[in-house]
Amino acid sequence: QVQLVESGGGLVQPGGSMRLSCTASESRVKITVTRWYRQAAGKERELVAAITGTDITSYADSVKGRFTISRDSAKNTAYLHMNGLKPDDTAIYLCNIVGGILPPFKDYWGQGTQVIVSS
């Protein structure tokens, strides 16, 4: 069973930066895609960014130019670098992977980390 451990959330002022991390507990896991979602209070879950195993990235229009998703396969860790943060970015951020040790691959989710953008 693969567990995802997220870190890096907290309180930041508008215009500030923050980096979220998502580490898979099992070193043997093969990850085909990593996604960051967010869910703000009273809103639906939103796909923020994704990165494939070949480093193809995609972003929601609301974060393009401000957020960058990356990964370090040697550390089994993915990152979400967030710049120019706005109050509308306040949400719980969740990491999701599609992967596993052997096929068929499955969806795994982190526990979520809270990001609050406020002065």
Image: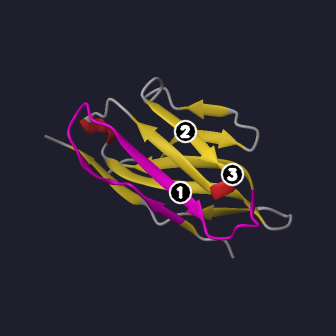
Closer-to-camera residue (40/66): 66
Mark with earlier residue (1, 3): 1
Q: Which residue is mark 2?
A: 69
In the rendered image, residue 8 lying in the magenta stretch gets the answer yes
Q: Quadrant of residue 108?
A: bottom right
Magenta region: which residues?
Answer: 5-30
The residue sitting at 53% across, 57% down in the picture is 22
Residue 114, magenta (yes or no): no
User: Is residue 29 or residue 86 the one in the foreground?
Assistant: 29
Disc 2/disc 1 C-alpha distance (Å): 11 Å
| Residue 15 rendering spot, x and y as whole percentages | 25, 30
Q: How many marks?
A: 3
Task: Tell me if I can see residue 114 in this picture.
Answer: yes
Residue 9 appears at what percent x and percent y? 35, 54
Left or right of residue 91, residue 104 in this image: right
Give how far across and how far down residue 19 sits, in percent: 41, 45
The crowd level at tag 3 (other Cα within 10 Å; few <14, some 14-19, many 20+) is: few
Residue located 79% across and 62% down the image: 105
* Residue 76 visible in the snapshot: no
Q: CA distance from mark 1 to mark 3?
A: 12 Å
* Residue topped by disc 1: 22
Residue identified by numbered label 3: 73
Mark 2 or mark 1: whose residue is earlier in sequence = 1
